[in-house]
Image (cartoon, rainbow, N blue to C red):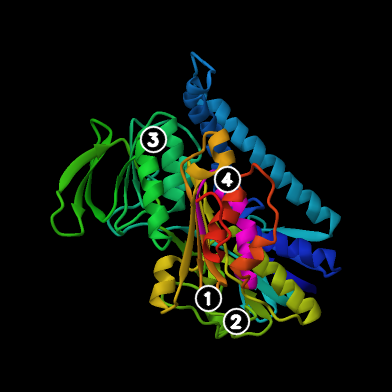
Protein backbone atom coordinates (compact mmCIF):
# COMPACT_ATOMS: atom_id res chain seq x y z
CA UNK A 1 0.00 0.00 0.00
CA UNK A 2 1.47 3.30 -1.12
CA UNK A 3 0.57 6.68 0.32
CA UNK A 4 0.63 8.25 -3.16
CA UNK A 5 0.97 6.91 -6.68
CA UNK A 6 1.61 9.43 -9.42
CA UNK A 7 0.59 8.33 -12.91
CA UNK A 8 3.05 10.10 -15.21
CA UNK A 9 6.71 10.96 -14.66
CA UNK A 10 6.78 14.45 -16.14
CA UNK A 11 7.34 17.66 -14.14
CA UNK A 12 4.17 17.10 -12.10
CA UNK A 13 4.77 13.41 -11.41
CA UNK A 14 8.45 13.39 -10.63
CA UNK A 15 8.58 16.67 -8.67
CA UNK A 16 5.45 15.81 -6.72
CA UNK A 17 6.90 12.38 -5.94
CA UNK A 18 10.18 13.81 -4.69
CA UNK A 19 8.27 16.29 -2.51
CA UNK A 20 6.22 13.39 -1.11
CA UNK A 21 9.34 11.28 -0.56
CA UNK A 22 10.97 14.11 1.38
CA UNK A 23 7.95 14.09 3.71
CA UNK A 24 8.42 10.38 4.35
CA UNK A 25 5.40 9.28 2.34
CA UNK A 26 5.63 5.94 0.57
CA UNK A 27 5.51 7.05 -3.05
CA UNK A 28 5.63 5.56 -6.53
CA UNK A 29 5.60 6.96 -10.07
CA UNK A 30 4.15 5.02 -12.99
CA UNK A 31 5.83 6.04 -16.25
CA UNK A 32 5.80 4.34 -19.64
CA UNK A 33 8.85 6.10 -21.04
CA UNK A 34 11.68 8.19 -19.53
CA UNK A 35 11.41 10.36 -16.45
CA UNK A 36 11.01 14.06 -17.09
CA UNK A 37 8.13 13.74 -19.53
CA UNK A 38 7.68 15.91 -22.59
CA UNK A 39 9.33 18.91 -20.94
CA UNK A 40 12.68 17.27 -20.29
CA UNK A 41 12.80 14.66 -23.04
CA UNK A 42 11.16 16.38 -26.03
CA UNK A 43 10.19 19.93 -25.09
CA UNK A 44 11.36 22.71 -22.78
CA UNK A 45 14.90 21.54 -22.08
CA UNK A 46 16.12 20.27 -25.47
CA UNK A 47 14.66 23.30 -27.28
CA UNK A 48 16.48 25.64 -24.89
CA UNK A 49 19.74 23.78 -25.44
CA UNK A 50 19.34 24.23 -29.20
CA UNK A 51 18.23 27.86 -28.87
CA UNK A 52 21.32 28.60 -26.77
CA UNK A 53 23.53 27.13 -29.49
CA UNK A 54 21.91 28.98 -32.38
CA UNK A 55 21.97 32.21 -30.36
CA UNK A 56 25.75 31.95 -30.59
CA UNK A 57 25.33 32.12 -34.36
CA UNK A 58 23.28 35.28 -33.98
CA UNK A 59 25.92 36.84 -31.76
CA UNK A 60 28.68 35.87 -34.16
CA UNK A 61 26.84 37.57 -37.00
CA UNK A 62 26.56 40.74 -34.92
CA UNK A 63 30.11 40.65 -33.58
CA UNK A 64 31.70 42.61 -36.44
CA UNK A 65 30.09 45.90 -35.45
CA UNK A 66 31.62 45.50 -31.99
CA UNK A 67 35.07 45.11 -33.55
CA UNK A 68 35.27 41.32 -33.40
CA UNK A 69 35.67 39.64 -36.78
CA UNK A 70 34.93 35.91 -37.01
CA UNK A 71 35.26 34.03 -40.27
CA UNK A 72 34.58 30.55 -41.62
CA UNK A 73 31.79 29.69 -39.18
CA UNK A 74 30.24 26.27 -39.78
CA UNK A 75 27.48 24.22 -38.19
CA UNK A 76 27.86 20.57 -37.13
CA UNK A 77 24.30 19.25 -36.86
CA UNK A 78 25.41 15.95 -35.32
CA UNK A 79 27.37 17.78 -32.62
CA UNK A 80 24.37 19.98 -31.86
CA UNK A 81 22.19 16.90 -31.46
CA UNK A 82 24.74 15.16 -29.23
CA UNK A 83 25.07 18.21 -27.00
CA UNK A 84 21.29 18.37 -26.61
CA UNK A 85 21.21 14.68 -25.69
CA UNK A 86 24.00 15.17 -23.14
CA UNK A 87 21.97 17.86 -21.39
CA UNK A 88 18.82 15.73 -21.36
CA UNK A 89 20.69 12.61 -20.20
CA UNK A 90 22.39 14.43 -17.33
CA UNK A 91 19.13 15.87 -16.02
CA UNK A 92 17.31 12.52 -16.40
CA UNK A 93 20.00 10.78 -14.35
CA UNK A 94 19.66 13.53 -11.76
CA UNK A 95 15.98 12.69 -11.30
CA UNK A 96 16.80 8.99 -11.00
CA UNK A 97 19.34 9.81 -8.27
CA UNK A 98 16.78 11.88 -6.35
CA UNK A 99 14.28 9.03 -6.58
CA UNK A 100 16.77 6.73 -4.89
CA UNK A 101 17.66 9.34 -2.28
CA UNK A 102 14.03 9.87 -1.24
CA UNK A 103 12.85 6.26 -1.71
CA UNK A 104 10.53 6.97 -4.62
CA UNK A 105 9.78 3.82 -6.59
CA UNK A 106 9.63 3.96 -10.38
CA UNK A 107 7.12 1.53 -11.89
CA UNK A 108 7.72 1.18 -15.61
CA UNK A 109 4.60 0.81 -17.74
CA UNK A 110 1.27 2.37 -18.69
CA UNK A 111 -0.94 3.13 -15.71
CA UNK A 112 -4.74 2.90 -15.59
CA UNK A 113 -7.02 3.54 -12.62
CA UNK A 114 -9.27 0.50 -12.27
CA UNK A 115 -10.73 1.31 -8.83
CA UNK A 116 -10.63 4.27 -6.39
CA UNK A 117 -7.40 3.03 -4.81
CA UNK A 118 -6.01 0.77 -7.52
CA UNK A 119 -3.64 1.41 -10.42
CA UNK A 120 -3.16 -1.35 -13.00
CA UNK A 121 0.17 -1.12 -14.80
CA UNK A 122 0.64 -2.68 -18.22
CA UNK A 123 4.15 -3.44 -19.46
CA UNK A 124 6.10 -6.03 -21.42
CA UNK A 125 6.11 -8.14 -18.26
CA UNK A 126 2.30 -8.21 -18.24
CA UNK A 127 -0.20 -6.59 -15.88
CA UNK A 128 0.36 -5.73 -12.22
CA UNK A 129 -1.89 -4.03 -9.68
CA UNK A 130 -0.75 -1.49 -7.09
CA UNK A 131 -2.78 0.03 -4.28
CA UNK A 132 -2.57 3.56 -2.90
CA UNK A 133 -4.40 5.77 -0.43
CA UNK A 134 -4.12 8.61 -2.94
CA UNK A 135 -3.64 8.67 -6.71
CA UNK A 136 -2.49 11.68 -8.73
CA UNK A 137 -3.14 11.74 -12.49
CA UNK A 138 -0.30 13.63 -14.16
CA UNK A 139 -0.24 12.19 -17.66
CA UNK A 140 0.33 15.48 -19.49
CA UNK A 141 -0.53 16.19 -23.10
CA UNK A 142 0.57 15.48 -26.66
CA UNK A 143 0.78 17.54 -29.84
CA UNK A 144 -2.50 18.10 -31.64
CA UNK A 145 -3.16 17.35 -35.31
CA UNK A 146 -5.48 18.98 -37.82
CA UNK A 147 -8.29 17.03 -39.51
CA UNK A 148 -6.67 17.53 -42.92
CA UNK A 149 -3.03 17.38 -41.79
CA UNK A 150 -1.76 14.29 -39.97
CA UNK A 151 1.75 13.56 -38.78
CA UNK A 152 3.46 11.00 -41.04
CA UNK A 153 7.04 11.49 -39.86
CA UNK A 154 8.29 12.35 -43.35
CA UNK A 155 6.46 15.32 -44.78
CA UNK A 156 4.44 16.32 -41.71
CA UNK A 157 6.28 16.26 -38.39
CA UNK A 158 5.70 17.26 -34.78
CA UNK A 159 8.05 18.89 -32.29
CA UNK A 160 9.42 15.52 -31.11
CA UNK A 161 10.59 14.66 -34.62
CA UNK A 162 11.87 18.19 -35.24
CA UNK A 163 14.08 17.94 -32.16
CA UNK A 164 15.83 14.85 -33.52
CA UNK A 165 17.68 17.10 -36.01
CA UNK A 166 17.95 14.31 -38.56
CA UNK A 167 18.18 16.85 -41.35
CA UNK A 168 17.62 20.53 -42.05
CA UNK A 169 14.86 20.95 -44.65
CA UNK A 170 15.40 23.49 -47.40
CA UNK A 171 11.92 24.95 -46.85
CA UNK A 172 10.02 24.46 -43.60
CA UNK A 173 6.41 25.44 -42.99
CA UNK A 174 5.43 25.91 -39.35
CA UNK A 175 1.68 25.75 -38.76
CA UNK A 176 0.96 27.58 -35.52
CA UNK A 177 2.68 30.65 -34.05
CA UNK A 178 2.63 29.68 -30.39
CA UNK A 179 5.74 29.11 -28.29
CA UNK A 180 6.61 25.72 -29.84
CA UNK A 181 6.21 26.89 -33.43
CA UNK A 182 8.18 30.10 -32.98
CA UNK A 183 11.03 28.53 -30.99
CA UNK A 184 11.59 25.57 -33.32
CA UNK A 185 11.02 27.74 -36.38
CA UNK A 186 13.76 30.06 -35.16
CA UNK A 187 16.15 27.16 -34.54
CA UNK A 188 15.68 25.82 -38.05
CA UNK A 189 15.93 29.31 -39.55
CA UNK A 190 19.39 29.77 -38.04
CA UNK A 191 20.37 26.26 -39.15
CA UNK A 192 19.66 27.25 -42.75
CA UNK A 193 15.99 26.50 -43.48
CA UNK A 194 13.75 28.96 -45.24
CA UNK A 195 11.06 29.14 -42.56
CA UNK A 196 7.48 30.26 -43.07
CA UNK A 197 5.05 30.47 -40.14
CA UNK A 198 1.28 30.60 -40.62
CA UNK A 199 -1.15 31.37 -37.82
CA UNK A 200 -4.93 31.38 -38.18
CA UNK A 201 -5.36 33.96 -35.40
CA UNK A 202 -4.69 37.64 -35.97
CA UNK A 203 -1.43 37.74 -34.00
CA UNK A 204 1.47 35.50 -33.09
CA UNK A 205 1.30 34.13 -29.55
CA UNK A 206 -2.52 34.33 -29.43
CA UNK A 207 -3.77 35.48 -26.06
CA UNK A 208 -0.58 37.35 -25.22
CA UNK A 209 -0.28 41.15 -25.14
CA UNK A 210 -0.94 42.39 -28.68
CA UNK A 211 1.49 45.32 -28.55
CA UNK A 212 4.43 43.18 -27.50
CA UNK A 213 3.50 40.33 -29.85
CA UNK A 214 3.73 42.78 -32.75
CA UNK A 215 7.23 43.85 -31.64
CA UNK A 216 8.35 40.21 -31.54
CA UNK A 217 6.77 39.50 -34.93
CA UNK A 218 8.71 42.34 -36.55
CA UNK A 219 11.97 41.18 -34.98
CA UNK A 220 11.49 37.58 -36.17
CA UNK A 221 10.85 38.88 -39.68
CA UNK A 222 14.17 40.74 -39.51
CA UNK A 223 15.75 37.35 -38.74
CA UNK A 224 14.46 36.04 -42.10
CA UNK A 225 11.36 34.23 -40.84
CA UNK A 226 8.28 34.74 -43.00
CA UNK A 227 5.20 35.14 -40.82
CA UNK A 228 1.57 35.18 -41.99
CA UNK A 229 -1.10 35.79 -39.35
CA UNK A 230 -4.87 35.53 -39.91
CA UNK A 231 -4.05 32.86 -42.51
CA UNK A 232 -5.42 29.35 -42.93
CA UNK A 233 -3.54 26.46 -44.53
CA UNK A 234 -5.47 23.78 -46.45
CA UNK A 235 -5.42 21.04 -49.10
CA UNK A 236 -2.00 19.43 -48.61
CA UNK A 237 -0.73 17.55 -51.65
CA UNK A 238 2.40 15.40 -51.47
CA UNK A 239 4.63 15.09 -54.55
CA UNK A 240 6.72 11.90 -54.15
CA UNK A 241 8.94 12.78 -57.11
CA UNK A 242 10.08 16.16 -55.82
CA UNK A 243 9.70 15.07 -52.18
CA UNK A 244 7.69 18.18 -51.38
CA UNK A 245 4.30 19.00 -49.92
CA UNK A 246 2.15 21.75 -51.40
CA UNK A 247 -0.54 23.65 -49.50
CA UNK A 248 -3.11 26.33 -50.23
CA UNK A 249 -3.11 29.47 -48.11
CA UNK A 250 -6.08 31.73 -47.62
CA UNK A 251 -6.36 34.85 -45.43
CA UNK A 252 -9.25 34.63 -42.99
CA UNK A 253 -9.88 38.38 -43.15
CA UNK A 254 -11.27 40.14 -46.26
CA UNK A 255 -8.95 41.60 -48.88
CA UNK A 256 -6.02 39.23 -48.50
CA UNK A 257 -4.30 37.34 -51.28
CA UNK A 258 -4.52 33.56 -51.68
CA UNK A 259 -1.53 31.53 -52.80
CA UNK A 260 -0.01 28.06 -53.11
CA UNK A 261 3.46 27.05 -51.99
CA UNK A 262 5.62 23.93 -51.76
CA UNK A 263 7.72 22.95 -48.74
CA UNK A 264 10.19 20.23 -47.84
CA UNK A 265 8.45 19.61 -44.51
CA UNK A 266 5.57 20.87 -42.40
CA UNK A 267 5.94 21.24 -38.63
CA UNK A 268 2.60 21.02 -36.84
CA UNK A 269 2.52 23.26 -33.77
CA UNK A 270 -1.22 23.81 -33.35
CA UNK A 271 -1.54 23.22 -29.64
CA UNK A 272 -1.79 20.17 -27.41
CA UNK A 273 -4.44 17.70 -26.29
CA UNK A 274 -4.60 16.00 -22.87
CA UNK A 275 -3.57 12.37 -22.39
CA UNK A 276 -6.78 11.13 -20.80
CA UNK A 277 -7.69 8.34 -23.22
CA UNK A 278 -6.13 5.39 -21.41
CA UNK A 279 -5.73 6.48 -17.79
CA UNK A 280 -9.34 5.90 -16.68
CA UNK A 281 -10.96 2.49 -16.98
CA UNK A 282 -14.60 2.99 -18.15
CA UNK A 283 -15.55 -0.27 -16.52
CA UNK A 284 -14.56 1.08 -13.11
CA UNK A 285 -17.39 3.67 -13.27
CA UNK A 286 -15.47 6.11 -11.10
CA UNK A 287 -17.63 9.08 -12.03
CA UNK A 288 -14.62 11.26 -12.84
CA UNK A 289 -15.77 13.99 -15.21
CA UNK A 290 -13.99 15.02 -18.39
CA UNK A 291 -14.94 18.13 -20.36
CA UNK A 292 -15.53 18.22 -24.11
CA UNK A 293 -11.87 19.06 -24.78
CA UNK A 294 -10.68 16.02 -22.83
CA UNK A 295 -9.51 17.82 -19.66
CA UNK A 296 -10.28 16.28 -16.27
CA UNK A 297 -12.59 18.39 -14.11
CA UNK A 298 -11.25 19.07 -10.60
CA UNK A 299 -12.20 21.24 -7.62
CA UNK A 300 -10.14 24.00 -5.97
CA UNK A 301 -7.95 21.39 -4.28
CA UNK A 302 -7.40 19.54 -7.57
CA UNK A 303 -9.57 16.61 -6.47
CA UNK A 304 -11.69 14.73 -8.99
CA UNK A 305 -15.17 13.42 -8.22
CA UNK A 306 -13.32 10.73 -6.22
CA UNK A 307 -11.77 12.71 -3.35
CA UNK A 308 -8.69 10.46 -3.10
CA UNK A 309 -7.93 10.82 -6.83
CA UNK A 310 -6.29 14.09 -7.88
CA UNK A 311 -5.27 15.51 -11.24
CA UNK A 312 -2.83 18.27 -12.13
CA UNK A 313 -0.75 19.80 -14.90
CA UNK A 314 -1.75 19.75 -18.55
CA UNK A 315 -4.45 17.19 -17.85
CA UNK A 316 -6.61 19.80 -16.05
CA UNK A 317 -6.35 22.54 -18.66
CA UNK A 318 -4.63 25.81 -19.47
CA UNK A 319 -2.03 27.06 -19.09
CA UNK A 320 -0.19 23.97 -20.32
CA UNK A 321 3.13 24.80 -18.68
CA UNK A 322 5.64 22.58 -16.90
CA UNK A 323 6.11 24.89 -13.92
CA UNK A 324 2.36 25.06 -13.35
CA UNK A 325 2.24 21.26 -13.36
CA UNK A 326 5.07 20.81 -10.86
CA UNK A 327 3.73 23.44 -8.45
CA UNK A 328 0.26 21.91 -8.54
CA UNK A 329 1.71 18.48 -7.77
CA UNK A 330 3.71 19.78 -4.83
CA UNK A 331 0.60 21.59 -3.55
CA UNK A 332 -1.35 18.31 -3.73
CA UNK A 333 1.32 16.66 -1.58
CA UNK A 334 0.97 19.43 1.02
CA UNK A 335 -2.81 19.02 0.94
CA UNK A 336 -2.52 15.26 1.48
CA UNK A 337 0.18 15.47 4.16
CA UNK A 338 -0.93 18.58 6.04
CA UNK A 339 -4.48 19.37 4.89
CA UNK A 340 -3.20 22.67 3.50
CA UNK A 341 -5.72 24.14 0.99
CA UNK A 342 -4.28 24.73 -2.46
CA UNK A 343 -3.73 28.40 -3.34
CA UNK A 344 -4.05 29.52 -6.94
CA UNK A 345 -1.97 32.40 -8.34
CA UNK A 346 -1.35 33.82 -11.81
CA UNK A 347 1.06 31.58 -13.72
CA UNK A 348 3.92 33.23 -15.62
CA UNK A 349 4.99 32.04 -19.04
CA UNK A 350 7.88 32.67 -21.41
CA UNK A 351 8.83 32.16 -25.05
CA UNK A 352 12.56 31.82 -25.65
CA UNK A 353 12.85 33.46 -29.05
CA UNK A 354 15.26 36.28 -29.92
CA UNK A 355 14.19 38.47 -28.19
CA UNK A 356 12.43 36.56 -25.44
CA UNK A 357 8.81 37.13 -24.45
CA UNK A 358 7.51 36.73 -20.89
CA UNK A 359 4.14 37.42 -19.32
CA UNK A 360 2.21 37.31 -16.05
CA UNK A 361 -1.36 38.27 -15.20
CA UNK A 362 -3.75 40.32 -17.31
CA UNK A 363 -2.93 41.69 -20.72
CA UNK A 364 -4.04 45.20 -21.63
CA UNK A 365 -6.88 43.71 -23.69
CA UNK A 366 -8.07 41.45 -20.84
CA UNK A 367 -7.96 44.26 -18.30
CA UNK A 368 -10.09 46.50 -20.52
CA UNK A 369 -12.60 43.70 -21.13
CA UNK A 370 -13.00 43.39 -17.37
CA UNK A 371 -13.82 47.08 -17.19
CA UNK A 372 -10.79 47.99 -15.11
CA UNK A 373 -9.68 51.61 -15.04
CA UNK A 374 -6.06 50.82 -15.85
CA UNK A 375 -2.83 52.72 -15.97
CA UNK A 376 0.04 51.44 -18.10
CA UNK A 377 3.76 51.90 -17.57
CA UNK A 378 6.18 51.30 -20.43
CA UNK A 379 9.94 51.41 -20.70
CA UNK A 380 11.78 50.59 -23.95
CA UNK A 381 14.99 48.61 -23.86
CA UNK A 382 16.46 51.26 -26.17
CA UNK A 383 16.54 53.69 -23.22
CA UNK A 384 18.23 51.31 -20.78
CA UNK A 385 21.93 51.56 -19.90
CA UNK A 386 22.65 47.82 -19.82
CA UNK A 387 20.49 47.21 -22.90
CA UNK A 388 22.70 49.55 -24.89
CA UNK A 389 25.93 48.26 -23.37
CA UNK A 390 25.22 44.68 -24.43
CA UNK A 391 23.57 45.64 -27.75
CA UNK A 392 20.12 44.35 -26.78
CA UNK A 393 18.23 47.53 -27.57
CA UNK A 394 15.08 45.91 -28.97
CA UNK A 395 12.36 45.36 -26.41
CA UNK A 396 9.76 46.78 -24.09
CA UNK A 397 8.71 46.31 -20.47
CA UNK A 398 4.98 46.92 -20.02
CA UNK A 399 3.19 46.86 -16.68
CA UNK A 400 -0.53 47.22 -16.05
CA UNK A 401 -2.05 48.53 -12.84
CA UNK A 402 -5.59 49.13 -11.64
CA UNK A 403 -6.89 52.51 -10.46
CA UNK A 404 -5.26 51.97 -7.04
CA UNK A 405 -1.91 51.36 -8.78
CA UNK A 406 -1.92 47.65 -7.85
CA UNK A 407 -0.11 45.62 -10.51
CA UNK A 408 -2.47 43.24 -12.31
CA UNK A 409 -0.29 42.30 -15.29
CA UNK A 410 3.26 42.56 -16.60
CA UNK A 411 4.77 41.72 -19.97
CA UNK A 412 8.29 41.86 -21.35
CA UNK A 413 9.66 41.41 -24.83
CA UNK A 414 13.43 41.70 -24.82
CA UNK A 415 16.68 40.08 -23.75
CA UNK A 416 16.43 37.78 -20.71
CA UNK A 417 12.68 38.40 -20.38
CA UNK A 418 12.16 35.02 -18.72
CA UNK A 419 14.86 35.70 -16.13
CA UNK A 420 13.46 39.17 -15.39
CA UNK A 421 9.88 38.01 -14.84
CA UNK A 422 10.08 36.59 -11.25
CA UNK A 423 10.06 39.99 -9.52
CA UNK A 424 6.98 40.99 -11.54
CA UNK A 425 5.48 37.57 -10.90
CA UNK A 426 5.81 38.25 -7.16
CA UNK A 427 4.42 41.77 -7.53
CA UNK A 428 1.34 40.69 -9.49
CA UNK A 429 0.68 37.64 -7.28
CA UNK A 430 0.90 39.75 -4.11
CA UNK A 431 -0.98 42.74 -5.54
CA UNK A 432 1.91 45.11 -4.90
CA UNK A 433 1.42 48.79 -5.61
CA UNK A 434 3.65 50.61 -8.08
CA UNK A 435 4.75 53.01 -5.32
CA UNK A 436 6.37 50.11 -3.42
CA UNK A 437 8.93 49.74 -6.21
CA UNK A 438 10.15 53.31 -5.62
CA UNK A 439 11.75 52.24 -2.34
CA UNK A 440 13.58 49.33 -3.97
CA UNK A 441 17.13 49.87 -5.19
CA UNK A 442 18.05 48.04 -8.39
CA UNK A 443 21.66 47.35 -9.33
CA UNK A 444 23.04 49.63 -12.03
CA UNK A 445 23.55 48.89 -14.85
CA UNK A 446 21.20 45.93 -15.24
CA UNK A 447 18.29 44.95 -17.45
CA UNK A 448 16.23 44.82 -14.24
CA UNK A 449 16.32 48.60 -14.11
CA UNK A 450 14.01 48.58 -17.11
CA UNK A 451 11.37 47.09 -14.80
CA UNK A 452 11.89 49.81 -12.18
CA UNK A 453 11.48 52.48 -14.86
CA UNK A 454 8.33 50.90 -16.33
CA UNK A 455 6.65 50.61 -12.93
CA UNK A 456 7.85 54.13 -12.19
CA UNK A 457 5.80 55.37 -15.12
CA UNK A 458 2.72 54.51 -13.05
CA UNK A 459 3.92 55.91 -9.71
CA UNK A 460 5.64 58.96 -11.19
CA UNK A 461 9.11 57.79 -10.12
CA UNK A 462 10.60 57.00 -13.55
CA UNK A 463 13.67 58.99 -14.56
CA UNK A 464 14.93 57.94 -17.98
CA UNK A 465 11.73 58.38 -19.97
Q: Is residue 348 magenta?
A: no
- Residue 206, picture quadrant: bottom left
Instruction: Mark 1 vs mark 4: give the one in front.
Output: 4
Find the distance from the CA under tag 3 to the CA under tag 4.
18 Å
**Viewed as shown, does residue 320 lie left or right of 238?**
right
Which secondary structure, mark 2? loop
Question: Where 378 falls versus 131 (above or below)?
Answer: above
Magenta segment, prevailing SS (helix, strand or loop): helix
Residue found 24% across the figure and 30% down from its top: 242
Residue found 19% across the figure and 59% down from its top: 253
- Of pointers 3 and 1, the one earlier in the residue sequence: 3
- Of pointers 4 and 2, the one earlier in the residue sequence: 2
Find the distance from the CA under tag 3 to the CA under tag 2.
46 Å
Let me know if residue 90 appears in the view: yes
Find the distance from the CA under tag 1 to the CA under tag 2.
8 Å
Would you name the residue on which mark 2 appears? 304
Q: Which x, y percent locates residue 352?
A: 52, 46
Q: Residues within 10 Å of mark 2 (few under 14, many from 20)?
A: many
Would you name the residue on which mark 4 appears? 416
Q: Which x, y percent locates residue 434?
A: 59, 66
Residue found 29% across the figure and 52% down from its top: 229
Would you name the residue on which mark 3 appears? 223
The magenta-colored residue range is 411-430
Please give the label number shown on residue 296: 1
- Of pointers 1 and 4, the one earlier in the residue sequence: 1
Instruction: Mark 3 vs mark 1: give the one in front.
Output: 3
Amino acid sequence: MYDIIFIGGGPAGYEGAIAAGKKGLKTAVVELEKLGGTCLQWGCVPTKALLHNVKLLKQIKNAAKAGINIENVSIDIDALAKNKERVVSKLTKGIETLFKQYNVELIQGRGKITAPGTVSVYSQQGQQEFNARHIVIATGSKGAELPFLKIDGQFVIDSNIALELKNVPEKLLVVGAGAVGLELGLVYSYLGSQVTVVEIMEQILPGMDTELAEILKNELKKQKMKIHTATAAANPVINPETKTIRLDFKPVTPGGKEWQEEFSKVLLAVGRVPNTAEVLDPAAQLGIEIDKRGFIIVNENLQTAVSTIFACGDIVGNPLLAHKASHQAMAIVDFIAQGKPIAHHPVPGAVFTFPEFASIGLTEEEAKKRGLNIKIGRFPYSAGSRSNAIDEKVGLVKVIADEDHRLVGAHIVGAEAGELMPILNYAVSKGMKAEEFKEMTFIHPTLCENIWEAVGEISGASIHI
